[in-house]
């Protein structure tokens, strides 16, 4: 049981929680009193006053209750007195506050005016100091004074930064205009000095050689310091600087001042050689200016990064890569050049095709040798503008159609590729290999395109070419111009390559771009072409197997009509030999399988082997066993022919030939079972008292798992030693 002190403390904790030190919550005291009274009444109703055992406990509880109530009343009285005093104090304080409010408002306005005047004074002092030293040589002090006025990296501590949250448009405008004024003067001064420093370095001059170029350290240090100043000097107007628009669909980020001066001599040389009436400015030789840009990049990009990256880092531009921006400035020269020439070039298909080849080669070298990011503008952006992209795809489509015609009309399109080049198990016709190379060439050409939408258009072209090539193969087969086996090998190789490509990262990305990132299943972009090729593979294999089996059937008549009922008993001392009537049939079978294995790819031959075995299995059962009576000697000879010759022949090409001939295997067991066993099984299967489960159990004991009871009865009745009544 809780003591009086514990109960009081619990009540006080509840009061402090509900009311606390907020006098506005005093009204909650009445609710607490009512709540406790209600809870006490409920306890009284539950108590059993008649039980003598509870009298002592009740007295103690009632006494505790009385004391608690007295304590609550006392605390309530104190709270009431405190509330009255506090209300009087607040009323008095409110009157005083109303009296000094105008004075406080005036003080606040004077403080704002003082801050306003201090900022004006700071701006005037900075401007005055810059006016005095602008023509001096203390460059570091000039930069520091300007950074006090406006600094991008430490914005909050500069004058303009302090005004960012102040409602003073005129003061903001005055500060901004002052910063823009001094930024222009300082930028002009340092740009001029930086340009002179680059000239001292002989930067960008024709005789510059990357292997022997070792400028004076003093000139390099001077250029680095000036570059750092130029990186530090930012204008408030640069925040809204416009992007450079070359064409409506090609925009470039503005270059930094340092990069602009670094690329200036190269721009001048580029304009000299590749514009106007110069002999080097030829529409049919885009490789000339592409090569020149790559050579300039190789000569200069490492020096630019090594020399001026530290200047950018010291200026606080940690994410800025001046080497890549320098390369972007050089590449931008090619973009501007192509944008002017491409309309005229596109009128001539040969020139346009040549431009595409050179542009793709240029892009590949940029990515491989310079690490040029795909997100940067490049020459490929010019040729992928909508009107030129459509022309590009149209050219690709026409070229590929002509190439497919040439592939199939070649002197020996169906000759197999040297097996030493690929896996020996694959039989690859030359035309299939060339077609796959054609698809790979298309992929290599559009792989460097930045936008997935552009790549998907070329993927659509690839799918169209695959379907076109499949149709041509089917047409060649249907017309009888080409046999099934070369067509099958070609389809099989194309199908295997496309299945492998479907798991390639490049094509998986295209699938994501095609169906969206939230697709429930990830499938191959070649799913439909592969499905079509599989359909034709199955159809042609079935026809091929049927043709082979028909040849075997044509030679099977003597064997099927042999004297199985009157065949003499085999002498135990003499071994079994193949039935003479089966020799010609097995000879055809050996020849057919040997030729198929030699001419078909391994996986196709395995499928064909199963189809042939399945048809022979069905044919032997239906056309021979079910239409022939077998004496015990005939059954034994048939068993030998099948297990030691047919199974052995197919065993050269698979591990378990008995699994290919399940019907023949089970029929042999029934035909060669002991006579007593056969009679009992026949009786059991015919008995109406046995359920199906019992009949299947009896068959299973003999190892028969593929026949139904009715078929087993029919096979057993082919035996001459089982008399039918």
Image: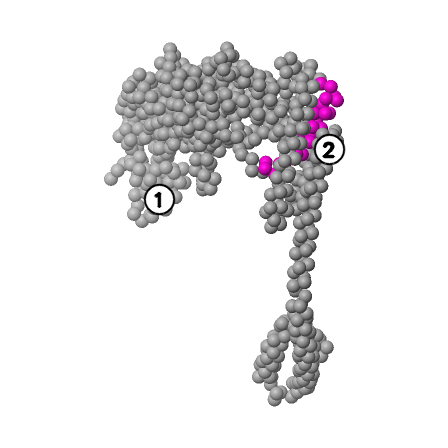
Q: Residues within 10 Å of mark 2 (few under 14, many from 20)?
A: few
> In the image, which disc is placed on residue 133?
2
Dominant secondary structure of the residues highlighted in magenta in the image: helix
* Front-most of residues 425 and 516: 516
Give the mark, 2 or 1, whose residue is nearer the N terminus.
2
Give the total number of marks visible in the rendering: 2
Q: Which class describes the residues within 10 Å of circle 1: few (<14), some (14-19), or many (20+)? A: some
Q: Is residue 355 visible?
A: yes
Looking at the image, which residue is at 35% across and 24% down?
Answer: 468
Residue occupying image coordinates x 67% and y 40%: 149
Q: Quadrant of the C terminus?
A: top left
Residue at figure coordinates x 72%, y 25% from the top left: 222
The image shows residue 79, relative to residue 290, as above or below, that is below
Q: Nearer the viewer, residue 381 or 647?
A: 381
Quarter of the image holding residue 368? top right
SS at badge 2: helix
Indicate the position of residue 692 as horizontal and vertical percent values.
34, 46
Q: Is residue 311 left or right of residue 253?
A: right
Which stretch did the figure color magenta? 215-238
Q: Which residue is mark 1?
A: 695
């Amino acid at each position: 049981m809780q003591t009086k002190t514990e109960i009081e403390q619990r009540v006080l904790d509840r009061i402090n929680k509900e009311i606390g030190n907020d006098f506005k919550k005093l009204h909650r005291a009445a609710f607490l009193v009512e709540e406790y009274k209600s809870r006490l009444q409920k306890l009284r109703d539950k108590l059993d006053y008649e039980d003598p055992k509870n009298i002592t406990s009740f007295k103690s509880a009632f006494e505790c209750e009385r004391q608690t109530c007295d304590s609550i009343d006392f605390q309530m009285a104190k709270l009431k007195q405190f509330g009255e005093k506090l209300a009087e104090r607040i009323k008095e304080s409110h009157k005083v506050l109303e009296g000094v409010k105008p004075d406080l408002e005036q003080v606040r306005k004077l403080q704002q005016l003082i801050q306003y005047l201090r900022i004006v004074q700071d701006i005037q002092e900075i401007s005055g100091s810059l006016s005095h030293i602008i023509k001096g040589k203390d460059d570091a002090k000039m930069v520091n004074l300007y950074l006090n006025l406006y600094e991008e990296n430490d914005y909050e501590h500069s004058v303009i930064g302090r005004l960012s949250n102040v409602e003073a448009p005129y003061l903001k405008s005055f500060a901004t205009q002052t910063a823009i004024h001094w930024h222009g003067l300082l930028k002009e001064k340092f740009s001029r000095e930086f340009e002179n420093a680059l000239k001292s370095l002989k930067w960008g001059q024709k005789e510059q050689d990357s292997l022997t170029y070792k400028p004076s350290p003093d000139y390099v240090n001077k250029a680095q310091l000036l570059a750092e100043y130029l990186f530090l000097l930012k204008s408030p107007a640069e925040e809204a600087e416009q992007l450079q628009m070359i064409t409506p669909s090609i925009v470039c980020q503005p270059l930094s001042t340092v990069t602009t001066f670094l690329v200036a001599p190269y721009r001048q040389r580029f304009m000299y050689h590749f514009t106007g009436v110069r002999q080097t400015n030829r529409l049919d030789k885009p490789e000339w200016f592409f090569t020149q840009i790559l050579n300039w990049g190789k000569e200069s990009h490492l020096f630019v990064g090594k020399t001026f990256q530290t200047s950018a880092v010291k200026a606080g531009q940690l994410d800025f890569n001046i080497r890549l921006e320098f390369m972007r400035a050089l590449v931008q020269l090619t973009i501007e050049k192509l944008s002017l020439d491409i309309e005229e070039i596109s009128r001539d298909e040969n020139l346009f095709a040549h431009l595409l080849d050179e542009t793709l080669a240029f892009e590949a070298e940029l990515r491989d040798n310079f690490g040029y990011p795909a997100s940067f503008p490049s020459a490929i952006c010019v040729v992928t503008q909508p009107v030129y992209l459509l022309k590009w795809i149209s050219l690709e489509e026409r070229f590929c159609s002509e190439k497919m015609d040439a592939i199939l009309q070649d002197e020996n399109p169906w000759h197999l590729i040297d097996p030493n080049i690929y896996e020996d198990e694959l039989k690859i016709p030359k035309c299939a290999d060339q077609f796959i190379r054609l698809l790979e060439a298309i992929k290599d050409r559009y792989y460097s395109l930045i936008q997935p939408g552009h790549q998907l258009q070329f993927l659509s072209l690839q799918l169209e070419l695959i379907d076109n090539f499949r149709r041509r193969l089917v047409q060649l087969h249907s017309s009888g111009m080409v046999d099934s086996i070369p067509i099958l090998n070609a389809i099989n190789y194309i199908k295997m390559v496309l299945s492998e490509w479907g798991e390639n990262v490049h094509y998986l990305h295209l699938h994501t771009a095609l169906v969206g990132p939230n697709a429930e299943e990830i499938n191959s972009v070649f799913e439909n072409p592969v499905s079509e090729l599989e359909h034709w593979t199955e159809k042609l294999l079935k026809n091929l197997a049927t043709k082979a089996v028909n040849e075997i059937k044509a030679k099977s008549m003597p064997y099927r009509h042999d004297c199985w009922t009157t065949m003499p008993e085999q002498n135990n001392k003499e071994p079994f030999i193949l039935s003479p009537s089966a020799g010609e049939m097995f000879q055809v079978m050996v020849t057919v399988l040997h030729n198929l294995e030699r001419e078909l790819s391994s996986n196709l031959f395995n499928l064909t082997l199963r189809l042939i075995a399945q048809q022979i299995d069905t044919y032997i059962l239906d056309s021979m066993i079910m239409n022939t009576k077998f004496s015990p000697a005939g059954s034994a000879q048939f068993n030998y022919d099948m297990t030691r010759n047919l199974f052995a022949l197919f065993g050269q090409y698979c591990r378990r030939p008995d699994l290919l001939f399940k019907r023949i295997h089970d029929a042999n067991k029934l035909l060669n079972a002991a006579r007593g066993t056969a009679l009992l099984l026949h009786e059991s299967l015919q008995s109406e008292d046995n359920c199906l489960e019992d009949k299947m159990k009896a068959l299973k004991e003999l190892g028969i798992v593929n026949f139904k009871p009715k078929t087993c009865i029919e096979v057993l009745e082919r035996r001459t030693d089982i008399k039918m009544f």
